[in-house]
Image (cartoon, rainbow, N blue to C red):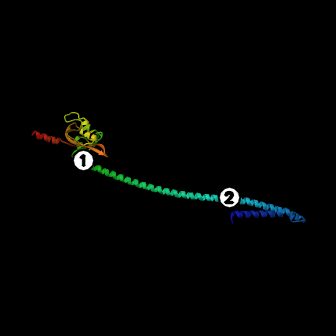
C-alpha cells in the first residue's frame, strides 16, 4: 500500500474515533426522553468532523503529492547528475588514456632521439679519434685556422717543428707566431700571406721557399699548401700542410759546395 493512502486511512480512523467519543460524551443522547432532540447536534458534529476530515485529507494529499513530485524531480535530477558524472568519468578516462598514449609515444620518440644522439656522438668521437690518429701519424706538419687566422688544431709533427706544445698554439694567430717575417728579415704583411688568402678568397694557395719561425726565434725553410675549409657552402677557415726543408736545403748546399 502506498505511503500516502496508508496515511489518509490512519487519519480517517482517528477522526472516526473522535466523532464516536464526542457522541458518547453527550449524556443527553443516552438518557431521558430528550435524547431525540439532541440527534441533530450529533449529526451536525459528525458532518463537521467529516468535512474537517475531507479538508485535512485534501491538504495532506496535496502536500504529499507535492512532496512526491519533488522527490521524483530530485530523483530525476540525481539520475541526470549520475549520468553526467558517468559521462564525464568516461570522457576523463578516455582523455587520460589518450594523454598517456601520447606521453608514451613522446617518451619513445625522445628515447629514440637520445639513443640516436648518443650513437652519433659516439661515432663522432670515434671519427675524431681516427682523424687525430691520422694527423698524429702524418709526417708533415698540419694545422687548421679559423676565419680570424687563429689556430684551431695542430698535429704533433707541426708542433715539434715549430717548438710548441700543440695545446699552446690553439687559439693564437699563426701569422704573428710563425709567419711574421720573410727569409731576408723584412716584415711579411698578412694581406700578402698565401695562407691568409686561402680563408679569405676560398681558393687553394701554395707557398715555396718561404720561412716559418721556431719558438726560439730561428727560422727554417718550408713549403706548404693552404686549402680552404667549406661547411654547407660556407667558408669556415683553412687547413695548412707544410714540411721542413732544412735537410733538403743542407743537401742542396752540400752538393753545390762539392
Spot occupied by residue 211 in the image (x, y as percentages of width and height): 20, 38
In the image, which disc is placed on residue 67?
2
Identify the residue shown where x is 75% and y is 59%: 56
Spot occupied by residue 129 in the image (x, y as percentages of width and height): 28, 49
Q: Is residue 109 visible from the viewing direction of this image?
A: yes
Residue neighbourhood size for the residue with mark 2, other residues' Cα within 10 Å, grouped as few (<14), some (14–19), many (≥20): few
Q: Quadrant of residue 252?
A: top left
From the viewer's perspective, tell me whether residue 71 is left or right of residue 179.
right
Q: Quadrant of the C terminus?
A: top left
Assign a secondary structure to mark 1. Answer: helix
Spot occupied by residue 128 in the image (x, y as percentages of width and height): 29, 49
**Vertical placement of 20 versus 147: above or below?**
below
Spot occupied by residue 32 in the image (x, y as percentages of width and height): 90, 65
Q: How many marks?
A: 2
Q: Which residue is mark 1?
A: 136
Q: Nearer the viewer, residue 182 or 80?
A: 80
Q: Nearer the viewer, residue 99 or 199?
A: 199
Amino acid at each position: 500500500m502506498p505511503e500516502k493512502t496508508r496515511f489518509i486511512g490512519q487519519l480517517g480512523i482517528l477522526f472516526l474515533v473522535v466523532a464516536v467519543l464526542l457522541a458518547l460524551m453527550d449524556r443527553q443522547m443516552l438518557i431521558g426522553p430528550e435524547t431525540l432532540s439532541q440527534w441533530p447536534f450529533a449529526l451536525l458534529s459528525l458532518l463537521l468532523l467529516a468535512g474537517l476530515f475531507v479538508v485535512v485529507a485534501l491538504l495532506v494529499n496535496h502536500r504529499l503529492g507535492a512532496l512526491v513530485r519533488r522527490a521524483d524531480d530530485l530523483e530525476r535530477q540525481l539520475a541526470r547528475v549520475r549520468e553526467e558524472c558517468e559521462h564525464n568519468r568516461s570522457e576523463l578516462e578516455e582523455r587520460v588514456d589518450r594523454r598517456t598514449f601520447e606521453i608514451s609515444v613522446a617518451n619513445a620518440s625522445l628515447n629514440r632521439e637520445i639513443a640516436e644522439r648518443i650513437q652519433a656522438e659516439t661515432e663522432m668521437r670515434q671519427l675524431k679519434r681516427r682523424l687525430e690518429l691520422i694527423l698524429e701519424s702524418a709526417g708533415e706538419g698540419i694545422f687548421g685556422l679559423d676565419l680570424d687566422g687563429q689556430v684551431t688544431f695542430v698535429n704533433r709533427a707541426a708542433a715539434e717543428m715549430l717548438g710548441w706544445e700543440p695545446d699552446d698554439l690553439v687559439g693564437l694567430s699563426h701569422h704573428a707566431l710563425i709567419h711574421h717575417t720573410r727569409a731576408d728579415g723584412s716584415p711579411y704583411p698578412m694581406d700578402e700571406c698565401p695562407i691568409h688568402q686561402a680563408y679569405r678568397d676560398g681558393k687553394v694557395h701554395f707557398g715555396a721557399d718561404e720561412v716559418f719561425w721556431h719558438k726560439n726565434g730561428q727560422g727554417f725553410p718550408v713549403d706548404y699548401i693552404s686549402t680552404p675549409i667549406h661547411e654547407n657552402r660556407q667558408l669556415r677557415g683553412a687547413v695548412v700542410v707544410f714540411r721542413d726543408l732544412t735537410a733538403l736545403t743542407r743537401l742542396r748546399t752540400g752538393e753545390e759546395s762539392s
